[in-house]
Amino acid sequence: MPLTDPKNTIPDAVKAIAAKRGATLTMLRPSLAVAFAVAVALSMAAADNGGVKPQGLANIAMGKPYEFSPPPNYGLCTDAGDKTQLTDGAYTEGHFWSRQSTVGWGQYSPPLVTIDLGAVQPICGVSYNTAAGVAGVSWPMSILVSVSDDGKAYYHAGDLVALGEEHGKPPAEGQYAVHRYWTSKLATHGRFVRFAIVPRGVYTFVDEIEVYRGADALMGQPHAGRKIDDKDTAEAIKDMVVTLHFRQRLKSDLAAVRETIRNVAGMEESAGELAAIEQLIATVEPPPWKEFRAILPFNDLHKRIFAVQASAWRANGAKPLAVWQKNPWDMLSPTEPPLPGGAKVDLVMMRNEWRSAAFNISNSGTSPATVRLSIAGLPGGRNPKFVSVRDVPFTDTKSGVPVAAALPEAETDGGDYRFRIESGMTRQVWLTFHSREIPAGEYEGQVVGEPGAIRVPVRLKVGAVALPDQLTLHLGGWDYTISAGQFDVTDQNRPALLRYLQAHLVDTPWANRTVMPTGKYDEDGSMTGPPETEAFKTWMERWPTARNYYVFADVTERFAGFAMGTPPFQKAVAAWITWWAGQLAKWSIKPEQLGLLLVDEPNVPAGDKLIVEYGKVIREAQPRVVIFEDPIWPDPRKADPEMFAVSTTLCPAMPMWISEGKPFADFYLRQRDAGKELWFYSCSSPGRLLDPYAYERMQNWFCWKFGAKGSCFWAFSDSAGASSWNEYASRGGAYTPMFLDATTVTHGKHMEAIREGMEDYEYLRMLRDRVAELRKQGTRGEALAAADALLSSAADRVTACMEQAEDINWKEPKDRSIADQVRVEVLNALLALEQLR
């Protein structure tokens, strides 16, 4: 993977049309789908719902220059005209993101547009013309307007989205529409007018911005808004963005609770309380963005909203403390009511593995509750060490959908685990069992708690077989733990990150090309000075148990100054890889343990050519070194065949495998059958809204189903430039499957799902090998036949929930019990075959 952010940038609008035509484009970049997207986007009908238009206002921005930060990057509409199109007075006709008269970005961070009026002018209003509404292209959350006389000190003038509501809101999402946000209620002045467009999703499109001249009297008025020094713009915008998300979270939860009480009799007082809270939301401020953690509830006002929810739960008959359950991998919402039926833990596992269970406690009382829990009756005495207990908070996401995904350790109090549950809220209790030291057998215990005489029965069965310490399937995630500053790795969090990844079965770390410098060469390509080894040695020492060391080489058309394809180039590349193979041998690293990703996600002929030119030389000089490639050609038959020929490991994107259908899969299966090693990777976002069961755990079942030897995820260290505890300040939703900040690493459900999927794969491998062993011995019988049948059907049964790419989303309903049901069947089959020894 590159050191640049690999987000998906095809608009969902295009994907939606593609889906209707049988060609869902899940993982593609704009450059891969321009021709297709243009053809289908042009066929979309455009509706104009711009509301009342400004009348009688002088647009003083007409023809004025402006600057972008960052430059537009959406492929279908980015062109040289972007530098003038926003103030040329020409409005787009037709679908916005297929027209070059539009300016577009594919990113979560707010794009900035700063217009230079040429002189300080009185300003009474502005307008911003955009389009959105279909399949993920959303209306902006906010358009923050600021003004400056000198281009150095800016002053916040208002939020155009809020100010523009008096002229009409854009239509509800679900239909394509054009909408102009405008206001004439500003009372300010300035030469420079800056627009910070805060997106709700990935995409921002605009075709025209206007600034309206106000009365001359405005020139003498002092600036009333927050002062923002130009050099502090990014920090100030983050604070404002966090405030917007903060208030939106309160508004959304208030709306959800209001809907809950709508059909509950006798809730008039609660409705009045919500009305009073609503009036206060606009007045509350979060802490500065660097200090804020988006853990619900945010503040006392937020607690009051949930207290109203508690009153509705009580009115519907809920107990003051309700213990309830759903599948641990199901999505949990802070506004869903407790379910009837109580809870229990019923877990079957091998020795030497990790498995999880969970139950929920909802507080329907009128005040916060402190619940103390302990575990009794299992091996190891009270609160045995082989069970970790985690307190699952709700955290909000950049997308505005709260998730219960973080798994911090529960607080302890005098030996018990302590959970504080606010009125009207639910806390999930997550239990992870590690059976390394537990003798085979069946055990019964319980989780007990006060107040409320809580009793959750625990039944644990440990089978008389054990997972090996080293699993078969390889696991990597472009962690880039080699140096601080690579994504969200810091000197402070790296030690914990390394421990965490290694404990979660990662055996294939990734580094950038700095670990393998080129050395020095004479003019004919002979090495005259060896490369520095310190970086690789440091990396190796951090990963002493790694089975592979993979490097993103990120090659270019020149190597050590030599042009690609020339004899000195070929000689130098051969000398370089041969020298490194010899050096690694001194450290007991075999050539086949070194993998090189020459070009990340090749998808155009130029990228294929780089792979071919370097790959040929490397394969000839050191044929055992791995050439690892992750092509994202939607139709791999259109790629250069030589690119596949020189690659030793092919790692297609799992969501593409699903969405692109049988021809795509068959191509890679033929490559596998011809001797290429097959891996899978995934790189979708926003990460917190992806289903841990379907996105992470299922990928390892697909590895088994199709004979893949490795599984990768972008990216273990990518928290999108901010703490995982405050996605509001991030570039976009975090990719990392754990919770990462500058100093700490906290367990996450998505990483737990990866580990459990790795163990699932090993179950199947153990059963396959045991069946083969018995067959070789000439053994026959019903148990062996049943095991054969199970191996034939297991992966199909489990992966059946993944029929389309959209199934990776957590919100998509599915039966998340099937993987464990089949896993237990595999364990029982193994136990039955043990009797045949």
Image: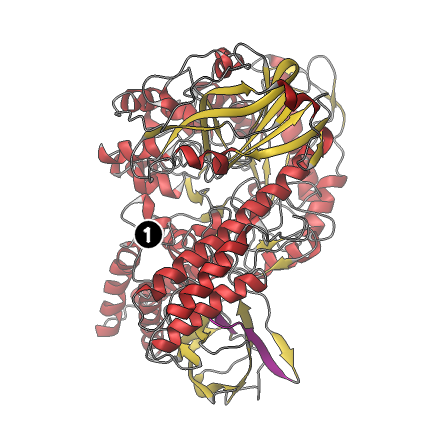
* Closer-to-camera residue (708/247): 247
Is residue 431 shown in magenta?
Answer: yes
Q: Residue at x 32, y 34 (%)?
A: 15
Query: Relative to residue 84, is residue 758 depicted above or below?
Result: below
- Residue 828 in the image: state x and y as whole percent: 33, 74
Q: Which residues are magenta?
A: 415-433
- Residue 264 in the image: state x and y as whole percent: 31, 70
Instruction: Give the left or right position of residue 332, taking residue 24 as reference.
Output: right
- The residue wearing badge 1 is 705
- Residue 557 in the image: state x and y as whole percent: 58, 17
Is residue 477 shown to the viewer in this render?
A: no
Query: Relative to residue 633, is residue 557 depicted above or below?
Result: above
Indicate the quadrant where residue 505 lies.
Answer: bottom right
Q: Residue at x 50, y 60 (%)?
A: 277
Query: Relative to residue 397, is residue 438 depicted above or below?
Result: below
- All told, the count of numbered labels is 1
Is residue 783 shown to the viewer in this render?
A: yes
Mostly what secondary structure, the magenta segment? strand
Q: Secondary structure at mark 1?
A: helix
* Closer-to-camera residue (356/415): 415
Amino acid marked by disc 1: Lys
Q: Quadrant of the N terminus?
A: top right
Query: Relative to residue 10, is residue 723 depicted above or below?
Result: below
Q: Residue at x 59, y 46 (%)?
A: 242
Is residue 147 shown in magenta?
Answer: no
